[in-house]
Image: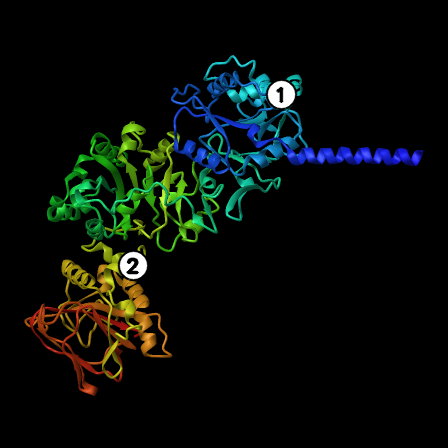
Amino acid sequence: MRFSSLLLFSAIVVCALSALVNSEVEGIPEDKLLVVTVATKETDGYRRFLRTAKHFNYTVKVLGRDQKWKGGDYMSAPGGGQKVRLLKEGLKEMKDDGQIILFIDSYDVVFASGPKELLKKFQQTKHRVVFSSETLIWPDRHLEDKYPHVREGNRFLGSGGFIGYLPNIKELIANWTGDDGDSDQLFFTKVYTDQSKRKSINITLDNKCRLFQNLHGALDDVVLKFEDSQVRLRNVLYDTLPVIVHGNGPTKINYLGNYIPNTWTFESGCTVCHEDLRSLTALQENEYPLVVIGIFIQQPTPFVTVFFERLLKLQHPKNKIKLFIFNKEAHHQRQVRSFLKDYGSLYENVTVIEPEEEMDGAASRNLGLDLCRRDQDCDYFFSLDIEVVLKNKDTLKILIEQNLPIVAPMITRAGRLWSNFWGALSGDGYYARSEDYVDIVQGRRVGVWNVPYVSNVYLVKGSLLRRELKDYELFSSSDPDMAFCHNIRNKGIFMYVTNMHTFGRILSTENYQTGHLHNDLWQIFENPVDWEERYIHENYTRIMKDKLIENPCPDVYWFPVFSTVACNHMIEEMEHYGKWSGGGNADNRITGGYENVPTIDIHMIQINFEKEWQKFLVEYVVPITEKMFPGYYTKAHFELAFVVRYKPDEQPSLRPHHDASTFTVNIALNQVDLDYQGGGCRFLRYDCSIQAPRKGWALLHPGRLTHYHEGLPTTAGVRYIAVSFVDP
């Protein structure tokens, strides 16, 4: 009998467990879940929220459409009561006691998973209402002692997200009688910290962020988790995968929304970058959008002439461009005026603010935006700082076709991780490096990225200025770019940066001196890439590959090194300096004060160019030297580097001599038959002459012992060469 009873009891237990398991497996039907949110206007964040909701097939009910928001700025001060009022009104007609209500914010929320997982985790809490949790108490710290203690997890309630059964939610908000501007957070906190109400309504907190992840105060606790074609957020503190991610308070979704749930994955890359594009391909020239390009010159900047050369190459009809040029620097007036004199008439309209008007940078940027705002025909404002090196001539076309409110082309500083965007914000609204920042800057992740800050170069829709950005002073003098981006974020407008193409870089303006005629010559240290593009011969990089090094005489090598611009600038710089030597043997510029084979010249050290010249030799001459003379290694030390001037009535030639060097570099700075007649170099030992030196080409030859040589007579015009005695 006892055995039979035991069998019967065991059967009952098994059946009960089976029923329990089946109940848990079945769970709450997904059609019982209704997502309720408040959105008084459609922002970019709201559209992102709906996109993720649609991806997981959530049913969403939106309250407050087209109503005026009266809930205050509850991100930085108590507010949000309007949400509770709208929720209370919205639930009145609902009668199904089995209905599950998920009430969340929308402007700064994304879904990371679907209803099935959400409902399962809700069911596992064994409570009727579950609130999101936070590490920080808000808005009344005096209520901290009333919160129940927890062994592990977040202790404080977050009102931006909660889920529960309809009857319990109704009971939760039944006593709301506050104004729209009152604090919803404070209201729900007082309900939760009231033990009797907490028990009656059966409320708990999602302490370990299994359902909700609030980001404020928790950015260091979360990382992206890449799964198969899906991206989740992982809370590393509690090892949980939240279903809902909320950028609450001053901490927004930031870079996380660029991934969750599948916006960018390692398998597919960017999945939304080709959506809602505006194609310009089929347009006739007169159908192109009108763009106001704002050019801002706020400090002495290298390569300004090159900037304007690239501006001319920008692929957009000139009659569909209006130029607004703000120039604070008198030093650059010559370049601006020269450009406008030659090309200003090509553009639809030109407005120039010159240094004499004493306008500050913030005011100029506000004015530039307003020119587009007030012009009903203005489709875009393209803000472009003078230090931006825009290499991609299709930049404007690419940005317009992205069809985004504000979008910047990613530019970087050569050799550094600096860029024109921030990946994330710190809790106090300043720069924070997102975990993907380096991968984006270095091109390992490619896409169009929602970011909290852009600068230097970006495109703004004209319609946005006329509708959402009506305030004139978007920039302020303290930090114009910070103020602009802060104002944009506060309007709920998204800014983007794209690295789907290579666009260019930004110059360093540090240590830029303006005391020379051609100041860009001195930029080989600060901006080496731009210096090379400007001053090194276009065929230099092909020297080895295409065997461009010639061997006109024994152990004499001839190769292209200087661009035409470099040659011209060197000559003009020396003539501008003007202190040519007299060509006599007495020379106090050199050690000992005596020159055995004098020339009429100016030394590099006289124009403070010796460091830059040695850098040039190390970077562009030494590699050729070591290739042509195997086993010889050099750091290109020199005592003498100078520019020589030959004129028939001054010094037409140079007598035979050895150079005081291990090897000599001789660069022709102008062109035979065009600038002068005659000239050249003859190596006596080999009876070998080079009588037609090419402009920008260098002769490389040993200096002592074997290569006794002379300078052949210049019979007309003026000949210039740059000479270096290396390793004396």
Where residue 206 is drawn, which disc sits there?
none
Q: Left of 658 or right of it: where is 223?
A: right
Query: What coloring was used for the rendering?
Result: rainbow
- Number of labels in the image equals 2
Name, please, the residue furthest toward the right: 1
**Residue 205 occupies which quadrant of the picture?**
top right
Mark 2 lies on residue: 524
Q: Residue at x 16, y 59 (%)?
A: 577
In the rendered image of this protein, does residue 727 appear above or below residue 394?
below
The quadrant of the picture occupied by the N terminus is top right
Residue 623 is situated, as x and y percent measured from the top left of the image, at 33, 71
Residue 677 is situated, as x and y percent measured from the top left of the image, at 8, 73
For this rendering, which residue is in front, 9 or 148? 9
Residue 472 is situated, as x and y percent measured from the top left of the image, at 27, 28
Instruction: Give amino acid for label 1.
Output: Thr
Where residue 193 is drawn, which disc sits there?
1
Q: Secondary structure at mark 2?
A: helix
